[in-house]
C-alpha cells in the first residue's frame, strides 16, 4: 500500500511539473476560478481522470503518457484560452490569458 502511494505521489509530482512547465498560464500568477475550472475540464477531456479512479493506476503506461500529452496539447492550444473565457463569462470574473481579456459586466 505504501509503495503504491509513494509511486502515485511521484507520478503526480512529475505530471504536475510537466503540466506547469508547459502551461499557457503564468506559473507565478494566482489562478482565477475560470482558469481552474478550464484546467479541470482539460484534465477530464484528456482522459486523465480515468487514472484517478483506479485502485492501481498505470502511471507511466502508454495510455497515461498519451493522456498527459493530450492534456498538455489542450492546455497550450487556443481552445484552452476559449475555455477560460467561457468560464470567466459564466462566473463573471476578469481573466487574462494569452493576451486576451474577458471582462466582468459592469454593475450599474
Image: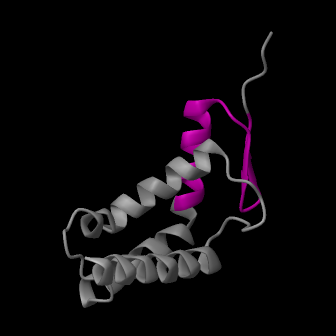
Q: Which residues are magenta?
A: 80-103
**Residue sitting at x 61%, y 72%:** 23
Query: In which quadrant of the rendered view does residue 81 lie?
Result: bottom right
Q: Position of residue 26 (x, y in %)?
A: 74, 66
* Depth order, front residue of 68/16: 16
Give yes or no for residue 91 being in the magenta stretch: yes
Relative side of 24 to 52, left or right? right
Please tell me whether residue 1 is drawn above or below residue 96 in the rendered image: below
Quadrant the N terminus occupies: bottom left
* Extreme residue toward the left, this view: 55
Q: Residue furthest front?
A: 2
Q: What's the residue at 69%, 35% (across, down)?
A: 93
- The reply to whether the magenta stretch includes residue 92 is yes
Residue 95 image offset from top left, x and y in percent = 71, 45
Residue sitting nearer the eye, 32 or 105: 32
Q: Is residue 24 above or below residue 32?
A: below
Q: Quadrant of residue 60?
A: bottom left
Q: Nearer the viewer, residue 94 or 51?
A: 51
Q: Could you say where residue 15 lies in the image, as x and y percent from the top left? A: 48, 79
Q: Position of residue 86 (x, y in %)?
A: 55, 42
Residue 29 vs residue 100, the one in the foreground: 29
Against 7, residue 90 (above or below) is above
Residue, x 35% and y 68% (percent of image)? 46
Amino acid at each position: 500500500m505504501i509503495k503504491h502511494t509513494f509511486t502515485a505521489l511521484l507520478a503526480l509530482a512529475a505530471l504536475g511539473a510537466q503540466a506547469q512547465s508547459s502551461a499557457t498560464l503564468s506559473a507565478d500568477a494566482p489562478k482565477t476560478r475560470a482558469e481552474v475550472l478550464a484546467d479541470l475540464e482539460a484534465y477530464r477531456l484528456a482522459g486523465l481522470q480515468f487514472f484517478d479512479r483506479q485502485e492501481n493506476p498505470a502511471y507511466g503506461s502508454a495510455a497515461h503518457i498519451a493522456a498527459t500529452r493530450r492534456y498538455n496539447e489542450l492546455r497550450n492550444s487556443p481552445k484552452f484560452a476559449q475555455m477560460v473565457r467561457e468560464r470567466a463569462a459564466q462566473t463573471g470574473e476578469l481573466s487574462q490569458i494569452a493576451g486576451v481579456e474577458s471582462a466582468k459586466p459592469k454593475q450599474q
